[in-house]
Amino acid sequence: MTEPAASPISLSSLHNASNTRRASDHDERGRSHGLPFIFWVMEQSRLALLAVPTIVAVLAYLVYPAGGWPLAVAAWFAVPVFGVVVPIGILIAQSYRQTEPATESWEPYLAWRDETDAKRWRGRKIPMEIVYEAYMAEKLDFRGDVYETMLRRNRLFRFAFTWGDAKFYFREFLGQNVTHTVAADERDIAHVYNRGNDFYRAFLGESMTYTCGMFQDAEESLEQAQERKLDTVCRYVQMKPGDRHLDIGCGWGPLITHAAKRYGTTSTGITLAEEQAEWARERALNDGVAEQVDVIVDDYRNLPARKYDKITCLEMAEHVGIKNFQDFLLQVRGMLEDDGIFYLQIAGLRRSWQYEDLVWGLFMAKYIFPGADASCPLGFVVSQAERAGFEVHRVENCGVHYSLTIRKWYDNWKGNREAIVAKYGERWYRMWMMFLSWSVIIAGQGSSTVFMITMTKNVQNDKSTLSPDERHEAAYSRTERWVGRDVVATQQ
């Protein structure tokens, strides 16, 4: 006997069913406006920051004069307490609440040199700050490969803030963010890159390019990926013979030399590190473009007021600080010809952060990139760029390529252990083992990434929007610039 056909269920009956939940009745939650507010606060001068509690204290005194000066003083201190100390205290407390119980013993992977330390943490997840500080101090050893052990970090370690994190944050991190003067930035940054070219070559390899490569295959060599990256940047800004090119934060000079040699530019680089500059000049000489390349050792704020056709900045802008970011962009805009192109590459944290992102960020600020607090979500960077009068044409997230790049740096560093320890000591070797191994993971999972942003001045008119007799008044034609076979306006 044939079974009767089932009656079709209409979409309207599903919609009207009492047990059907609407897609708009979800449990998803967006982030608050707290982070943009923090960015705004960090932009303000110290005088402005001091004015806020002063105004609150005066208002308290005027509203309740019977309280007298004790009330005014209490009101003044209440602003930093409730505006900074309490929120940070809540964040620290929540970092412990979010951690799951230990699911795997760390003992097969770590070896404490003192049994007292081992006993303290046995059966518990170890806070990440305790792990890396003990490892660098040679109180703790990894039994196997550091990177392979870090892949198990969620089971072994706890991403909760420690007393050491809090001390660094209040003693150093806040101070770095509030100042960002020329002298302060030179003090924080110059010594990092003057450490020794051999130190950096031990992980950067022959190309001495301290930025992410671009891979077409994960098994490609680091040098192939870096060569492709340099050429891609030149193509993004449409380098051509005779272009006056400025690279802010030129490092060891790979981009300025590449642009001069392959595209015929006259390229100027600026760095705070004399050792980088010496390497860059020698590179340009060896590549036969010494006459086209100039390297300045100075702070970017001291650059001469000249105009450039193309300006590039690869992972230096993080160091200018949130406080100076808008001024930096305005300076770049002032140096850029009206028909010029600006390429900004900047590392940043994701907006929907997790606690590991912040714990890693404090480690980086403490040991690797001091003062680089402008590593922010993309929204901050684009908003600042548009506020400064730029038109953003292309944004690309290149974090996966960074993960592949850092993994190759890690292998290089690990392979050069003997030479590194002989000259720089065990602590420096271990510090970079932690930095590189952890950063492979951080970039790979999107905790931190790098944004490649191509922009131009947002000029009032366009040649294509004016009559023939007026077109000479406009800087350029967007149609001619971004429509064509190889203009890199879109993915190709």
Image (cartoon, helix red, strand yellow):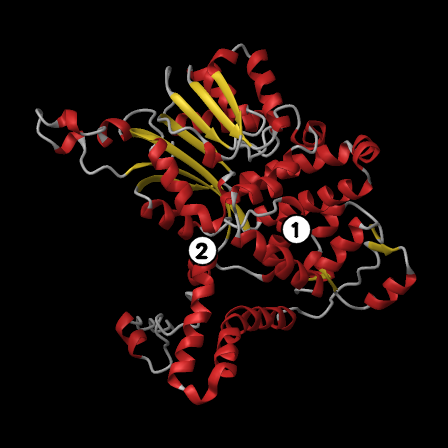
**Is 462 rendered above or below residue 18?**
above
* Residue denoted by label 2: 45
Taking the image as shown, residue 146 lies to the left or right of residue 368, namely right
Q: Residue at x 46, y 17 (%)?
A: 260
Q: Which mark is residue 366?
A: 1
Q: Nearer the viewer, mark 2 or mark 1?
A: 2
Q: Position of residue 106 (x, y in %)?
A: 80, 60
Figure quadrant of residue 476: top left
Residue with the most extreme right position: 115
Q: Earlier in the sequence, mark 2 or mark 1?
A: 2
Helix, strand or loop under label 2: loop
Q: Identity of the amino acid at label 2? A: Ser
Distance between mark 2 and mark 1 Cα atoms: 23 Å
Q: Residues within 10 Å of mark 1 (few under 14, many from 20)?
A: some
Query: 321 or 341: nearer the eye?
Result: 321
**Is 316 rendered above or below residue 35?**
above
